[in-house]
Image (cartoon, helix red, strand yellow):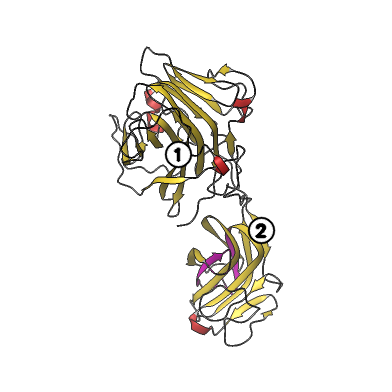
Amino acid sequence: MKVKKQRIITTVLGSLAPLVFASGMNTLSAAPIVSSTSRPLPIVQERWSCPDPIGGTCFLIADLGRVDSVTGIQVAWYQGNSRRYAFSVAVSIDAAKVRTAYTGKSSGTTTGLETYMFPAALSARYVELSVSQNSIRPFAASVTDLVVLGCQCVLDAGAPDVFGVTKLYASAGSRIAWDSRHWQNGHPRDILDRDPDDPTQVSQQRGDSARVHVDGNGILQFLGTGPNLPQPRLYLNDPADYFFNNVEITLYYQRVADDNTPWGGAVLGARSGPDGHSVDNTLWCDAHTYYGRIRHDGTKDFDKELKHPGSLARGATNIWNGGSLPFNIWIGMKYIIYNIDNNSHVKMELYRDLTEGKDGGTWEKVGEIVDAGNWVPPQASPVCSYPPDFIPVTGGGVIILRDTGTTETRYKWFSAREIAPPLP
């Protein structure tokens, strides 16, 4: 798995240029430099001090000069080896709408820089450090250095992807992404194991009683062949270099012919292990997959699997006015999965587009769900070593595209991107 490297957006103290102070209570403002205390607030010998705040909170606001992707801050506290500071960090794009990104206390053990990382990268121009308590002197604050950190995140939410389809979330700094442009290279072919025309060698054919065929004009087909129930799969399976965890998956799906298996249809899975669905049952505890499904029977749902093949679905509702999944139209599907609550829980979102991508698509959220525990799929004996309601906040990095009972299913404009998860 690739590790994100943090970059320094700005070192704040030592220059008045990137600083904006706001008077009054804990509110961001792009006003000229004023004080959060009862008197002017200069930086003296590159140290910011706030001995008597108005309203009981000292705060310092860094104006980055542009919207950037902020992942955390570093603070060097004055006499930080002998006192502890209680503080919070808030961010804003426009100095009007504010969200809290971090709350905590300093260690009390060092005068050097301490690092405080946000749960997720956030788009921000203004970064506010608010200090509410000092273990030696209540309300006073003193900082010798403040550094704003960012990842190489791409502020591309709302921009088109390589197929012209709108991205709903910003890409992560790792820039891990895959797409199916190689399906349109003029070379018809069946995929047998790895697709030789995939320049990344990430896509891999799996499944039973079916062909996985590329027509060379941008379309991939699942073609049932029998004699058993067709269960074709296409994996994005290279967790060493393409580890998908917090991810936005997009494709367009067309139902052509099938046996109407209720749970078949447009089905995407994420966070699977690379071999958790193999014939080797000693690996089945690595299956741990979250599925988003737009099913043949007209329902959407979310299905959780820990040990293969047992699973448990939640959030089932019909999204076709009581009917079944229509045939012979292109249906856009986005399945988005990301961690929340300091990487302790998992949120899933499911969207559809019925315009065939016109102007990037009109993306309608048809469902969302959170795994906060107590979601317990069945397991055959012997059960897995992890808890029965295990939450795969990391998982195995593999994405699965699948169908069941198909005679022919078509896909195009398939892509997957690591995203920077939003804060609640």
Say above or below: 189 vs 103: above
The answer to which image quadrant residue 310 occupies is: top left
Q: Is residue 276 above or below residue 88?
A: above
Disc 2 marks which amino acid?
Ile
Which quadrant is home to the N terminus? top right
- From this viewpoint, which residue is outermost toward the top? 227
Quarter holding the C terminus is bottom left
Mark with earlier residue (2, 1): 2
Give me the residue at 70% from left, 78% from top.
Answer: 45
Between residue 55 and residue 141, name the one nearer to us. 55
What number is the disc on residue 395?
Answer: 1
User: Can you give x and y, in whole percent of width and height, for residue 369 in the image?
Assistant: 37, 47
* 75 falls in the magenta region: yes
Please name the residue shown 41% across and 21% down the image. Answer: 257
Question: Residue extending furthest bottom?
Answer: 39
**Is residue 283 found inside the magenta-colored segment of the image?**
no
Secondary element at tag 2: strand
Q: Is residue 57 above or below residue 242?
A: below
Q: CA distance from mark 2 to mark 1?
A: 30 Å
| Labelled disc at residue 8 | 2
Q: Could you say where residue 103 lies in the image, as x and y percent from the top left?
A: 48, 65
Residue 352 lies in what quarter of the image? Answer: top left
Tell me if 127 is positioned left or right of 261 in this view. Answer: right
Q: Where is residue 155 drawn, in percent x and y?
A: 61, 52
- Location of residue 383 by image quarter: top left
Percent of width and height locating residue 190 = 54, 17
Near-viewer residue (420 or 114): 420
Magenta segment: 71-96
Residue 220 visible, this angle: yes
Apparent side of residue 12 relative to residue 363 in the rendered image (left or right)? right
Secondary structure of the residue carrying tag 1 is loop
**Residue type, mark 1 in image:** Gly
